[in-house]
Image (spheres, rainbow, N blue to C red):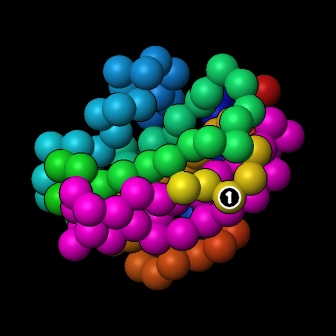
Amino acid sequence: MIKVRIKDKWFNNPKVLNTEKEQQLGYQHLELDDIDESNCCLLFVFPEESNNRVFHMRNVLFDIQLYALDKNKKLIDAFPMSYNDNMEVNYPIKGPCMYVVEVPLKILNDCCLDCSLHHP
């Protein structure tokens, strides 16, 4: 079982996005009312570590907190992404990234820079 911990909250069985198509969609076109703690955590799993990962908010209708982790599941970057930035802003990840966790800010209640991934 995959678990994600953000501050003192645990998210069991996050939605794992392995394919490029799934990763491109992410939270696009979803309404915040359709998301709750049982289905809110997205885990992007990339085939290899890269220093060139960039995220965006195109077609995402709510604010998100992003956590980037390296191949050893160590947190390397974290930042909020704003719905108001929608099409204009790209969010580059600073450092070698293999995993990304995204959670709507509504679920977290605040920005937290503490995240760990428990994955066999």
Residue ID at (44%, 49%): 55
Helix, strand or loop at disc 1? loop
Q: Is residue 71 left or right of residue 93?
A: right
The quadrant in which residue 112 appears is bottom right
Q: Residue under circle 1?
A: 94
Residue farthest toward the bottom in the current orientation of the protein: 110
Q: Is residue 36 left or right of residue 94?
A: left
Can residue 37 be seen in this snapshot?
no
Q: Is residue 8 left or right of residue 39?
A: right
Residue ID at (46%, 18%): 19
Local packing at callout 1 (Cα closer than 10 Å; few below 14, some 14-19, many 20+) is some
Identify which amino acid the numbered label 1 is placed on.
Lys
* 20 or 45: nearer the viewer: 20
Q: Is residue 73 left or right of residue 102?
A: right
| Quadrant of the frame with the C terminus | top right
Q: Position of residue 50 (x, y in %)?
A: 70, 36
- Vertical order, 90 against 80 (above or below): above
Q: Position of residue 87 (x, y in %)?
A: 22, 57
- Which residues make up the magenta segment? 63-91
Q: Position of residue 75 (x, y in %)?
A: 75, 57
Can residue 96 be seen in this snapshot?
yes
